[in-house]
Amino acid sequence: MLECNNINIQNEKNDYLIENQTFRILQSEIFTLTGASGVGKSTLLKYICGIKQESFTYSGEIIVYKNIVSHLPTNKRGVRMIFQNDLLFPHMNVIENLLFAAPPYRKNIKDEALSLLNKLNLSHLSFKNVTMLSGGEYSRICLARIMINEPKVLLVDEPFSNLDKNTKNITRDFFYKNISAMNCATLIVSHDMEDIYSHDKVIKL
Amino acid sequence: MNGLKHLINQNTPLLIIFLLFGIIFLIIGNIFYELIIQLTIRSFSNDFINLLPSISITLMNNLFSVICAILIAFFITNYLYKKSSANSSFLIILISFPHISYCIGITYLFATSGLFARLFAIFYGNEIPFTSSSGDGLANFIYILSLALREVPFLVLIGLSVWNKINSNQIQQQVSVLGHSELSALMNCIFPLWLKSMGLPILIIIAFSFSNYEFSLILGPQFPDMINVKIIESWYSSNRELTKLLNSLIIITVLISSFAILILFYLRKVTIIYLKTTRLFISINYNLYLLGKYLVILLITLFIVIFLITFFLSINNSWFFPSIIPVTFTLKGWTYMIDNYAELFLNSILISSVISISSLILMTYIIEISLKNNKIFRILLLLSFIILVMPQNIMLIGISGLMTRLSIFSIEIWFYFSLFIYIFPYTYFMMKQTYEDFNPQYIDNANVLGISKIKSFFYIKLPLMINDFLLIFGVSFSVCFYQFLQGIIVTKGEKLLFNNEVLILFSGESINTASAGSLLNFIPAGLLLIFIFIKSRYARM
Amino acid sequence: MNKPLDILIKVCILFFINQSLYSADVNFHAWGGSIMINDFIKEVSKNLKSKNINLNHTKITDIAESIKILESDKKIGNFQKGSVDLMWVNGENFHKLKKNQLLFGPIDKIENYKFINQNDQSLHIDFGEPVDGLEVPWGRAQFVMIYDSMMIKNPPQTIKQLSDFIKKNPGRFTYPQIPDFHGTTFLKQLLYELVEDKTILQKPFSNCLNPCLPIINLMTFLKEINPFLWNKGRRFPKSVSQTVPMLSNRELWLTISFNPNMAAANVRSGNLRDVTRTTSFINGAIGNTHYLAIPFNSPNKTAALEVINYLISPKSQADKSNIDIWGDPTVLDLNTMNKKQKKLFLDKESIHILPNNQIPYLVEPHYTWTEAIENEWFKTFN
């Protein structure tokens, strides 16, 4: 469960990008965060994750499964994120990216990773160089990487913004089908109203 | 007009490169031809067996020093990159610091009667140094550490530019949001990517380690018994056995340097594979930032101490154990150098400048004319690779032999050529970075406005790239200015650079004059690079 | 006016103008590592200007460089336009030059050659090889040992005393790495001390029985002292110059040299402490001569001969032997000089060096012994 209480983010001119935002996302719930371009959606997501911009001022409480994590570094918060320009590690192939992303306590996960790729109909890409993937394939592998990480809280920042319309539709369906199956508290940023129809709640900035 | 037509003909650069290739192959061919006539398999295998201890020491020491240099450079680059406000201009000064002064400082730090021993004497109270019982272990350690630290500034300078291209900030964030530690981001992702792009700088330093001579000459008795030294000793010797040994030494040097390169690149490959698959670091929260910081402090402190030691040596009248600072001072070393070598000093500056500018112009010309030819960079890479892989001392022995056969050119021409060919790979490497960083959109915009190629080069490209060109000139100049093997092997004392005279003085007793000379050496390259750096910073502001 | 006289005067003027305009360049290849020697040659160069000679001191690291130039000149058939006009050579290198016919000669017909000591055979035989007029003696050298008198009260003067000193004071003595010229000479000196019949060393090494007892004895002695040398004999300095700072810092207490005046010169220049003194083997120390030679293809042979003539003049030799200038002993016989010339050679006394002619000269062994000793040393210690 993800709880954000009284989040305030001010830019360098002390203008409020985010003012007094409070919301709670329970396990299995999917929320959408919408707003005009530049309103601070990505900034809010990054703040929840623990990624701050130096010139901005932040305040507010982040609670993950009843633990206050506001003071913790990104990797210790238990919050996972897919960026707008998510980056697969270019020196690793697809399967190596997945293996690397698996949680620390998991051992001998190669079979599992291959099985996941198979389930997602991506097994033909298992040993492919990530720099050779198409836009849609890239986005799907980014999701596969997050899936193997077994997130409890997932933030997704406009993952389809760089795709053409056809690829976007295919990839979007793929995403939501699999995110729903993950049963984690999910917050998706999107300015596309088509993405919102099946979701639990909308947070508008 | 016809001449200009030929000049801008796409085939002309290829002809030039072809000519250079031809000369290089003639040089290599000459070396092997001489060896085939003079060497037998039996004598070679006997020499090889006898030299096995030296071979293994040379191989191990050079390998370890390069590996240490890479690791230290990585941590320092990590620190400097993160601390973006940190002034990395000190790297320019460290790179332009002469090898000779550096070696003097190292010798005087670690010698049995050196600075550390003198500091110890303050506390221990001994008026005379303890007897030297340093075994091979300490000598090898000193060599490895000193050579490694000498190479670090160069690796860091290139490494920072490589780091910029890796997108390391995003990688860091990406790894953090997967729940893995910062150390994991560094070791699993950034280090492999960084290492992958550092191939050419690593090649440069490993090639240098197999041909360097000044370290042995000046480190003196503490220096381990290495092949680099034996080659020059054989070159000078009138002992027939040692003269015959030279042929075997040439082959051995080529073999072990090639072997070392293969090992290093294999290790690099294995390291990258290991690091991208290991999960050792993902839960370890150790911060290597501090390690980088301490290494920077160590590096800067070492160079400052070395500079001070060399400076004191140059002005001391008598500086005996256990004094920490000289008792009496004199400027006679400096005045002697200026009185006797001013002309050679200025001449060396002129020669180095002309060679560097020529190399820069030629490289620019080749690249510009063949820009549509995608293979040009690969051909230049191959040529640079061949030049780099061959240890400099062997290359020069080849040039010396070829000079005797092709007596159509004067000794000066061969001298300038041997300097030019040495800085060619450096020029190529830096030029390639510059062209890769240049946004071709500028030229496309110029083209659609109807501006000619030549005009767009002089009015658009050149002004935008001028700072990079100046830096390339500065680095080539300092590399050229510090050369001396050419004066020994190619011209045999007939044509020299200033650095040769400094080295000759080291073979005598007057250490204070030689030290003054080595610091004088520092001035042109140091000032030039500082000026270039300041200019480029102002340009950015 | 008297027309023929006019013409004669004009011709004379032209001749003298021509003479004054004429100047020859002499490229003198000589080791450039010593400030004292460099300064001396610079002074000589100034003095030669009056003879219209430009003496250029090409400072080299090792004469082997110049020999390589000559070898390559000969190979390509350059017999007229060599770049080397004058060389400063010593024994092993002379042998190579002579054998390969790289020298011009005879060059001993110059005016000042009359001052050279004709009876001293050590000046006319170089490492056992007759000079045959192909080189002219320039200076002398003799094996000495330099020591710190605060550390050593009774300096060694025999091989037994040296051995005792080394064993009682481990790590305080060493010799340069073979085949450094001084290192090899030290071994030859020890050979003289160890051998019963010294004449065997004047004959080629091939005359020595197999196994050669003198060599065996020498190696035995070296093996005995090796563990007590500096750095336990694991490593050796590359040259005598590297031992000078070690001596000044008292890392070493005793070192060797081939310049009897080295101690005085280095104390004066601040490289050695004031307590530095000189000693040698009382039974005799190897004496050696260094020479000047003209390459076969020098284009300025006449001028080079003039330079040699100047360098063996009493004035120049006196300057050279002055310990405040260089301190290199003269090759001239003072008995051939007049009073004025002799006065130039007033011995400057110094507590740092031994009085002149105190130690008997031992002639260098035949050159074949040099390689034999070096090769045996490599086998034993390298």
Image: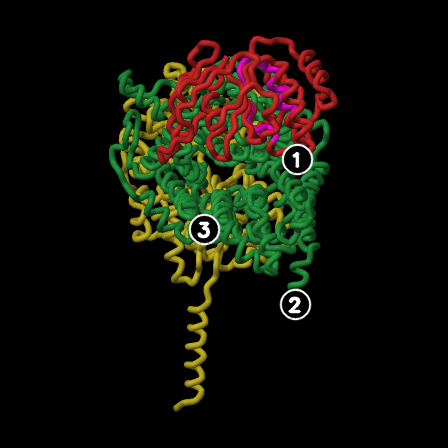
Q: Nearer the viewer, mark 2 or mark 3?
A: 2
Tell me which amino acid carries mark 3: Ile
Q: Chain of mark 3?
A: B
Tell me which amino acid carries mark 2: Met
Q: Chain of mark 2?
A: B
Residue shown at the point (51%, 51%) measured from the top left = B464
Left or right of C58, for residue C344: left
Tag 3 or tag 2, which sits nearer the N-term? 2
Give the chain letter for green: B
Q: Is residue B533 above or below residue B165?
A: below
User: Are labels 1 and 2 on one chain?
Assistant: no
Disc 2 to disc 3, C-alpha distance: 35 Å
- Residue that mark 1 sits on: A164
Disc 1 to disc 2, C-alpha distance: 52 Å
Identify the disc placed on residue B305: none
SS at mark 1?
Answer: loop
Disc 1 to disc 3, C-alpha distance: 59 Å
Query: Which quarter of the figure has residue C284?
Result: top left
> Which of the two residues, C227 or B270, is positioned nearer the viewer here?
B270
Q: Is residue C146 visible?
A: yes
- Residue that mark 3 sits on: B349
| Whole-percent x, y for residue A83 in the image | 55, 27
Identify the disc placed on residue B1: 2
Near mark 1 (Cα within 10 A), the count class, few <14, some 14-19 or many ≥20, is few
Find the magenta span and give its range.
A140-160
Q: Nearer the viewer, mark 1 or mark 3?
A: 1
Q: Colour of chain A?
A: red
Q: Is residue B496 visible?
A: no
User: Residue furthest toward the bottom?
Assistant: C1
Residue shown at the point (31%, 23%) measured from the top left = B118
